Amino acid sequence: MDEVARLVRAMQRPAEASSDFDLNPLIKPPSGSVLRPAGVLIPVWLRPEGASVILTKRSSHLKHHPGQVAFPGGKVDPTDASVEAAALREAQEEIGLAAHLVDVLGHLPNHETVTGFRVTPVLGLVRDAFDPIAERGEVEEVFAVPLSFLLCPENFSIERRQWMGQWRRYYAVPYGPYYIWGATARILRGLADRAAL
């Protein structure tokens, strides 16, 4: 079965929401906190050499998550019609991916971040020629990882580091020089689990 068919079948399977707290039951979000909505795009680029997922490396000078690997995306603005619209707008701004080049397959379950966001991942196919252009204020680099690599649960591991005086466990899926971890890796692991069924 080809990779796109695997994605379509995966999207038809039930899945639960995830969170940065999944692997850290002793770390609790602040009580009464209101999650801010955000949308990220998981752009699956269909190229002759095979499908890949486009990711970004955030600029090292950013205040939040500097140098981390992330999906294109961000918080929902008041002018956004939906979380999907926010994800597509951010992809245009961050990597130059025009919305008309993306065929949206659907949404993955929401992911709650430790930084107070409710992230909705939007899965989309990029079928046409596309020349990524990094928005230098936010994005240091745009790169692609083979979809087949990211759909293999065995490529993921659980690692840990100290965060605010506590050990925090998280998913990681390193690829070459890129250390993909945290919410990005957790969302990808959820998709890999659904595709493996």
Image: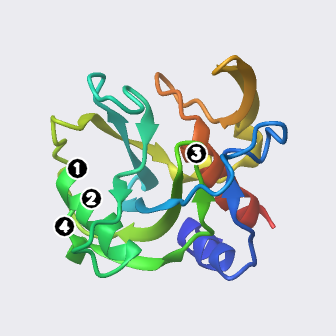
Callouts 1 and 2 close, C-beta under 8 Å: yes
- Mark toward the start of the polypeptide (2 vs 4): 2
Callouts 1 and 4 close, C-beta under 8 Å: no
- Mark toward the start of the polypeptide (3 vs 2): 2
Q: Which mark is residue 94?
A: 1
Between marks 1 and 2, how big is the CA–CA gap?
6 Å
Instruction: Residue 101 in the image: state x and y as whole percent.
Output: 24, 72
Instruction: Residue 46 in the image: state x and y as whole percent.
Output: 38, 63
- Mark toward the start of the polypeptide (3 vs 4): 4
**Residue ID at (60%, 38%):** 182
Identify which amino acid the numbered label 1 is placed on.
Glu
Q: What residue does disc 4 label? A: 98
Is 103 placed left or right of 4 in the picture?
left
Q: What residue does disc 3 label? A: 183
Between marks 3 and 4, how big is the CA–CA gap?
24 Å
Instruction: Residue 76 in the image: state x and y as whole percent.
Output: 34, 65
Identify which amino acid the numbered label 2 is placed on.
Glu
Q: Secondary structure at mark 4?
A: loop
Callouts 3 and 2 close, C-beta under 8 Å: no
Q: Secondary structure at mark 2?
A: helix
Is residue 43 in view from this perspective?
A: no
**Residue ID at (42%, 61%):** 38
Between marks 3 and 2, how big is the CA–CA gap?
17 Å
Q: Which mark is residue 90?
A: 2
Q: Quadrant of residue 51?
A: bottom left
Identify which amino acid the numbered label 3 is placed on.
Ala
Between marks 1 and 3, how big is the CA–CA gap?
18 Å
**For discs 3 and 4, the disc positioned in front in the rendered view:** 3
Q: Quadrant of residue 84?
A: bottom left
Position of the C terminus by quadrant: bottom right
Position of the N terminus by quadrant: bottom right
- Mark toward the start of the polypeptide (1 vs 3): 1
